[in-house]
Image: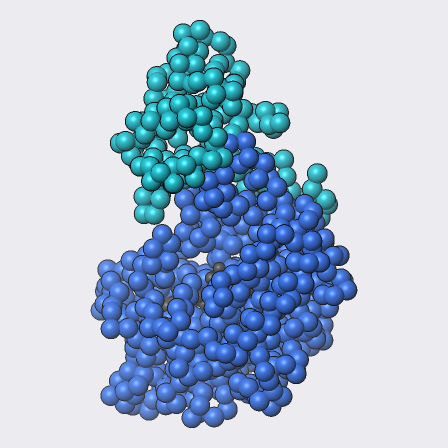
Amino acid sequence: MSAELSADIVVIGAGIVGALAAQRLARQGASVLILEAGPRLERARVVAAFRNSPFKGNWMAPYPPSPWAPHPIYVPQDNGYLKQAGPYPYPAEYIRAVGGTTWHWAAQAWRLVPNDVRIKSLYGVGVDWPLSYEELDPWYQEAEELLGVAGADNTGSPRQHPFPMAPVAEPWSMRRVRERLAPAYPVVANTVARNSRGYDGRPACVGNNSCQPICPVNAQYLGINAVEAAEAAGAKVIPNAVVYRIEHDVKGHIAAVHYYAPDKSEHRVTGTTFILAANGVESPKLLLLSASDTYPNGLANRSGMVGRHLMDHPSTSLTFYADEELWLGRGPQSPSSINTLRDGAFRSQHAPYRLDFTNISQVLNVTNDLIKEGVYGAEFEKQLRWRAARQINVKNVLEVLPNPDNRITLSAEKDAMGIPKPEAHYAIDDYTRRAAEVSKADFARIAELMGGTGLRYSADGQFANNQHITGTMSMGNDPATSVVDAFGRTHDHENLFVCSTGVMPTAATMNSTLTGVALALRTAEHILPAKNSHAATAHVGHETSLA
Amino acid sequence: MVPDKLDGVSASHDHPADPSRRRLLAGLLTAYTASLIPWALAQPAPHADRGAFTALSALLVGRQALDAAQATRLYDALATASPHFPADVQALLTLINERHIDPLQLQGVLDGEHSPLAPLPRSIMSAWTLGVVGSGENARCVAYETALDAVIVADVLKPPTYAYGAYGSWTGKPS
Ligand SMILES: Cc1cc2nc3c(=O)[nH]c(=O)nc-3n(C[C@H](O)[C@H](O)[C@H](O)COP(=O)(O)OP(=O)(O)OC[C@H]3O[C@@H](n4cnc5c(N)ncnc54)[C@H](O)[C@@H]3O)c2cc1C
Ligand code: SF4
């Protein structure tokens, strides 16, 4: 065992959520050590790996897992890392590397709507959050200013202060969708961590249309930017440090964490306060893995809820040809949505949803389709241009309710380091399925308004996953039913906090990262209050650029 | 309709006529196939296998020009991936020559007859249009920016990871 490391704050996981909590704490003068299972990546190499990949539609292809810190891979085949216990598959995607999964996110950086945190009281489903939207607002603002979020005011989420940036310029394709769906459906600009002007030393978007899997120019905020900010504030990152055990003392305080280096040498790191930020799958795995005689069910698990209430956003979709040339693929990938179905009395009956339009170039999909159909000869080129110009896709982003049977457990199978793999138990209930059914009418109406032909609905009962891992370490006021309190502190261990989308008690309809970051900044403030600020009053120096 | 769009990609149709080579490639085509790809008659072809690949490629992708260097690269990659490849190409070209099969009908014909050649058109199409040779674990990327799916839409779109243009340049109507 090597010499021990120590810090005031030890953070497990260098993803966007943990790194932003780390940078805030480091700025307050704490010594911060971030242990990250995966290696450092270089943006240029990721870009090259994508260009050289035979699987351009698979955004994980440029991110091969390292043997000591595997992550799930499904193409060309399942690498068997995330075991599936069923009944419905939960093919989570995440990246274990310095910077984490947002290397290849779409940067949709949404707030919830206020009613999302009160669905039990209002609609009799799910649970209420232990805090209100109003309490979240300043933390959203701070998160938005750190990430550099561009957005418009008409998306349904109230705010006290302006967005840091005006919305990103609307691609032609989305302009036409917006114009043609009005007034039946208001199509709004997505709220995104993508620069509509130079921001914080990073350039404005130049439309590479590869936001997933990699923004080549740093116009989209990534976890690696958060890591660099933490390092600039004095935090130290140890890459290739696979934490495999969290150790407690006789009083139930966390005393240390243990990690393996790639050569499987063991290292112990002590600290005063510990932050678990290894994402919504690996974090509960680590808590379960750290079981001891005193805590036979794992740490922070008095309630038995660690790993339970796994939620995400399933989607069904419609693909069709519009009756005019739209040419998806010019500009960023995720520009526009319909937000009016995110809330309403119907939530007592079925899930709410956001309707999401992609602006991902259709060329790859269309080419694959044509080859599959055997369209050869002069017709190939004609069809390729016709379809790539007109093909469009709309999907729903459906809420899933917390259900304790949906969960992450430890698999009996182990990875190359001898650490148990995570296992997913997942089902999609009728509440969500009913909404998928209801949204078909929206799909049909949208296609009609766009003069759609060649309508292709996703297969009944088949849901795509959106990779918004939530719920597995839910926050709540009651230690009997939740894992952490409203500040992210584990009910069972005074100096162990969780910073993750996994603390969200419900999933709502919006991509969860901004909420995860906002909650983490609030946790950081709780651990070590900022000397002279509160985000609610200290929104410094941004342009007033409300659209 | 295409050649002007191919500037800088297709050098091949500029080759000076070489009677011996022209005979070679012409010898691989019938009047039927030559009528689909008349430009190919003037193609230099180092030997029969490569000539047959060029001709079959042209029939499948339906273009009136193909980049010679790309053809060489793709042929080498495909032939390395499958030892039967050269013979299969010859056989499929012969089939099309003899039976005058319309490229648009080709896959249906091969599938319907359970022909052992049925996977061949797709693997050639995939190489030219996606730049991908082989499948599954054996898939390899041999072209990206110069794959035909990028070239065919190059007047409107950039391949993903290449900047479209200055901020906001995507707001206008594509022309
Ligand atoms: C294709 C795709 C698109 C997405 N698009 C969006 C979007 O548009 N908007 C949105 O809000 N969300 C999006 N997401 C989800 C988003 O990426 C996650 O919500 C976000 O990354 C969560 O951040 P995190 O820091 O909690 O976890 P991660 O980013 O996963 O980071 C966790 C870190 O912990 C490390 N770690 C794990 N185990 C250990 C261990 N044992 N020891 C040490 N370190 C460990 C990991 O290596 C990783 O670096 C997308 C996800 C995918 C896959
Ligand atoms: S469109 Fe390009 S520049 Fe803009 S965010 Fe996406 S990848 Fe980055």
Q: Point out residue B45 in the picture as x, y percentages from the top left corner.
A: 40, 16
The percent coordinates of residue B19 (x first, y second) are 44, 6
The colour scheme used here is by chain
Residue A209 in sight in this render: no
Res B153 → quadrant: top right
Q: From this viewpoint, is residue B105 visible?
A: yes
Q: Colour of chain A?
A: blue
- Quarter of the image containing the C terminus of chain A? bottom right
Where on the picture, by quarter, is residue A110? Answer: bottom right
Give the residue displayed 40% in from the left and 75% down from the top.
Answer: A426
User: In the shown orientation, is residue A150 left or right of residue B130?
Assistant: right
Instruction: Choose between A366 and A43: the one closer to the eye.
Output: A366
Which residue does the image show at 39% across and 78% down from the upper left?
A: A407
Q: Position of residue A396 (x, y in %)?
A: 58, 66
Using the image, determine if residue A123 lies above or below residue A142: below
Q: Residue at x 42, y 75 (%)?
A: A427
The chain whose colour is cyan is: B
